[in-house]
């Protein structure tokens, strides 16, 4: 038994494949354009792609995008650096920020990343943003609880 041919990935791909099938049945490019609601120029481009690369050329292509700046080995090294802590790289306090991570990547690999992009890189590596709980060191929990149970109800009633 042969493997099933997958259907079109999206409606645009389906339209190109339909145009190719109609051309194979002897339809003119103008008739195909009218039937599919596109320009004759679009059909002409599809037919050229089909002639040069076959049906595969008519299928959806995912844009490759730019090549990553970091190699796979360098990317694998980033979590190792993060595990060492920020102070190991000369920062005051052991909190990682996107700017600090970008600085370490620049120092260690010679690759510059904008701090906004570092967040995307870290999410791709399985790291998430951690926001520290900011509380005053002088915070008096007993006084806060007393205010919450005694003073607040009195204020709320009035």
Image (cartoon, grey):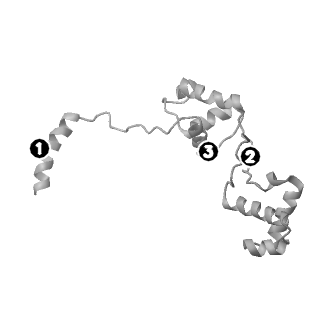
The residue lying toward the viewer, choosing from 78 and 106, is 78
Contact between marks 3 and 1 (CB within 8 A): the answer is no
Residue 5 locus on image (x, y percent)? 72, 48
The residue lying toward the viewer, choosing from 49 and 106, is 49
Q: Residues within 10 Å of mark 1 (few under 14, many from 20)?
A: few
Residue 95 locus on image (x, y percent)? 49, 33
What kind of element bears circle 1? helix
Q: Residues within 10 Å of mark 3 (few under 14, many from 20)?
A: few
- Observer able to see residue 38: yes
Find disc 3 in the rendering and name its residue.
117
Q: Which mark is residue 38?
A: none
What kind of element bears circle 2? loop
Q: State which tag comes first along the sequence, 1 or 2.
A: 2
- How far apart marks 3 and 1 lie (CA) works out to 49 Å
Residue 91 locus on image (x, y percent)? 54, 30
Find disc 2 in the rendering and name its residue.
66
As drawn, the residue found furthest toward the right would be 52
Left or right, 105 with respect to 144, comes to right
- Observer able to see residue 39: no
Q: In the image, is residue 79 above or below residue 41?
A: above
Number of marks in the image? 3
Q: Residues within 10 Å of mark 2 (few under 14, many from 20)?
A: few
Residue 117 locus on image (x, y percent)? 62, 44
């Amino acid at each position: 038994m042969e493997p099933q041919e997958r259907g079109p990935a999206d409606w645009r791909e389906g339209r190109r494949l339909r145009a190719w099938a109609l051309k194979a049945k002897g339809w003119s490019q103008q008739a195909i354009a009218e039937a599919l609601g596109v320009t004759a120029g679009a059909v002409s481009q599809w037919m050229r792609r089909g002639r040069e690369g076959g049906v595969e050329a008519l299928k959806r292509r995912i844009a490759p995008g730019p090549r990553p700046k970091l190699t796979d080995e360098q990317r694998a090294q980033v979590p190792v650096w993060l595990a060492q802590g920020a102070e190991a790289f000369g920062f005051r306090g052991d909190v990682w920020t996107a700017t600090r991570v970008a600085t370490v990547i620049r120092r260690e690999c010679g690759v510059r990343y904008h701090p906004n992009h570092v967040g995307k890189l870290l999410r791709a590596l399985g790291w998430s943003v951690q926001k520290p709980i900011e509380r005053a060191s002088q915070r008096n929990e007993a006084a806060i609880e007393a205010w919450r149970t005694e003073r607040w109800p009195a204020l709320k009633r009035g």
